[in-house]
Amino acid sequence: MPELDKKSEYIIQVALPVPLRKVFDYLKPANGQQPVPGCRVRVPFGNRKLVGLVVAVKNHSTLAREKLKTIIQVLDQGPLIEPAQLKFLQWAANYYHHPLGEAIDAALPTLLRQGQAAEVAGVSEWSLTSLGLEVDVASLARAPKQKDCFLQLRQVSGQVLTREQLQEFNPNWQVAIKGLISKGLVEKRERKPALIESQEVIAGPALNAEQENAIKEVESAGQGFSRHLLHGITGSGKTEVYLRLIQNVVDSGQQVLVLVPEIGLTPQLIDRFRSRLRATIGLFHSGLNDRERLNVWLGAKDSDSQYQYQVVLGTRSSIFVPMATLGLIIIDEEHDASFKQHEGFRYHARDLAIVRARDADVPIVMGSATPSLESLFHVYQNHYKLLSLSARTGEAVLPGIEVLDLKLTGQHSGLSPQMVLAMDQVVKKGEQVIVFLNRRGYSPVYMCHECGWLAPCQRCDAQLVFHKNSARLRCHHCATEQRLPDVCPQCSSKELHPLGEGTERLQEEIQKQLGSEVRIKRLDRDSTRRKGSFEKFYKKILNNEVDIIVGTQMLAKGHDFPNVTLVVIVNVDQALYSLDFRSSEHLMQQTMQVSGRAGRGKKAGIVLLQTYHPEHAVFAALKHHDYREFAKCELLLREQAGFPPYACLALLRAESVGRSKALEFLTQVRSAGLKYIESATNKGDVVINHVVPAPMEKRAGRYRAQLLVSAKTKKALHQILKPWIAEIDEMKNRQVRWSIDIDPVDLY
Ligand code: ADP
Ligand code: ZN
Ligand code: ZN
């Protein structure tokens, strides 16, 4: 028998961040270094050099040895990604039919992707020198940019600023800082990553019976894999339940991963975690810089690290943060659509969290006031345990909900007189109002009153939105932006007017009707673009410096504004006309969540909703705060229509510059797919629908088409997809871009 020496293990299989559903064979580096699975390597690829991850080491390749290239450099001594984590990523790539290398890439912090060392390091910051603390600002009079920058440093507490903060003040900060350093006024230093551990922990309230019970249920299920859905109405104390569960797991020496929606990670929530938990907490979200993210990633992964994080609190991508001793996963607002990645590697963080909990053999708790129908379905199937919190804590009670019929009330610029009156009364009492309208800008349409011309986006099948503050027309689907035309491009008339209402106009209108002394703030993506502005808003609202908050769905998340006693829901009717099978569910969730902002303090709250369709079932359920009743009816409809959770969907999307190319491509894809159904063991279980143009066919200059595949079981779906996708990969069509979305959330 030939001796198996080290030389025989010379083929290194590497996953690379390229859009190809395969891994690549390389030879181990000339210096004899032996890479192990899970470590990063730098390799030649075409005429580029890429960082990839070793997934296997073998002794044969299907390629001839001369054809194989050699690894340039081994970047990690041991596995950066442990076998269990690698297995999880392989599972995810396989399930979403996404290239493994790209999936791994999505799971790695940017600096690791770039090939930097997997070591905790300080964060750069700039501070005043002792000279800088004393010097007279007037001496910088001739260098205004430096002076500005210098003043910023003097004014912030601690007199230190990070790269991001400097960037926010002035995009050209680097030049100014350089000048200040050369004058000896400023110095750069590296701040060691600090473990944020709260020194004094505040005790929480005594729990009520339902909360106690929820905790007992989770803990008595044991330390192994178990799934729980915590359905608690808004303000019922779900977070309190999480906090106790987390503390107990941390006290037993294990780590906890907590996922929250993008907009849910508010300063309020972070403060609450910090002030309540005896634990080191690492935040992981897109607002951090690359270095900070890497530090948390490494600190969570390594149980020996002096930077060990016991709790990782983050958004969607935290699902990939490796944890040395994971003991519990919590998903807050589990119904939230931001857990689904909408481009590239289209994973769903909640769904992956379940897989991760199963792999790690730990409990997972998913919580929401408005659980997804999928999760409730799993409860009814006895897959998840249901934990209920049915009452608001303390003195707070659920708000009364009144639905106004716009056909009877009439409206002026989108507001019925009843709403205006109600707002006026609340403001006069010194309480606060939330006005919800899920549409940014001044008006969604800009129209010529002579000829009916509507300002269109040239690149999308959509109208341009008029933004009055910036005097521009903007497309909300692509980046297109243009100045307001002086005259109608079609008939040269000057009669150009806004049509319909967005948040800007609503703000203006309320101001007009209630008077200039009323303090109104707008909370949407336009008004919170600057980093930190959301936090400032928050403080203003909590300090009662605002009477009325006009905002989009940013307001729908779990904020707690105790002085808000009236919530006004202006226009949700569009959702009633939507063809998307999830639109009722989303409408119900959104309106319930927004309504839940009212009456969270000691004062009772009320919700006013105006609609042209007061008879709609969603509103009846809303009035009774009966989400589960709504869910039952909606599930019945889904079952009849064969939609999830009674079916598994995959959506193939294609787009091209010419109108017909994408449609033609998918038609070809479809006929290829049909033969796999023919040969499948359970033929009737999969349906490939017809190719159709996307609901908004043209977007950002490309025409889009889609093909929906529906199956009775996941197994049947994936059985067909695997060979089918391999075949599509072979259909060379340079003019078409295509993608596959497993369990799509949006069907467009
Ligand atoms: P949810 O996460 O369900 O919206 P929270 O956990 O944020 O609810 O609780 C809402 C408010 O009630 C918070 O201010 C919280 O401190 C308080 N709270 C929670 N549980 C209790 C309790 N058992 N007794 C009194 N107050 C409580
Ligand atoms: Zn015109
Ligand atoms: Zn556009």
Image (cartoon, grey):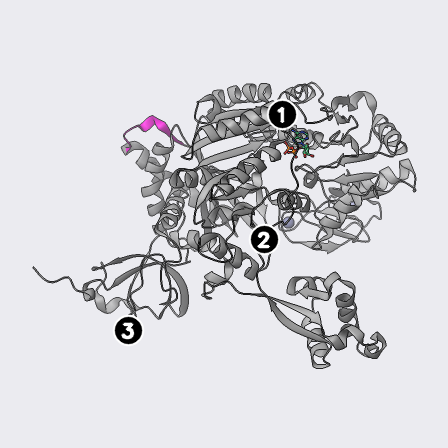
Residue under pointer 2: 286
For label 2, being within 8 Å of ligand 1 is answered no
The amino acid marked with disc number 2 is Ser
Tag 1 or tag 2, which sits nearer the N-term? Answer: 1
What's drawn in magenta, residue-wise?
Answer: 680-687
Tag 3 or tag 2, which sits nearer the N-term? Answer: 3
The C terminus lies in quadrant: top right
Circles 2 and 3, Cβ within 8 Å, touching? The answer is no
Residue 517 drawn at (x, y percent): 92, 42
Say left or right for 62 vs 475: left
683 inside magenta stretch: yes
Residue 266 drawn at (x, y percent): 66, 45
| Quadrant hosting residue 212 | top right
Residue 331 drawn at (x, y percent): 53, 38
Q: Nearer the viewer, mark 2 or mark 1?
A: 1
Considering the numbered disc 3 on the image, is that residue within a helix, a strand or a loop?
A: loop
The amino acid marked with disc number 3 is Ala
The N terminus lies in quadrant: bottom left
Circles 2 and 1, Cβ within 8 Å, touching? The answer is no
Q: Please state which of residues 549 and 83 is positioned toward the viewer in this rendering.
A: 83
How many angstroms separate mark 3 from mark 1 (CA)?
66 Å
Structural crowding at the residue carrying mark 1, measured as other residues with C-alpha within 10 Å and reported as few (<14), some (14–19) or many (≥20): some
Residue under pointer 3: 30
Q: Nearer the viewer, mark 3 or mark 1?
A: 1
For label 1, being within 8 Å of ligand 1 is answered yes
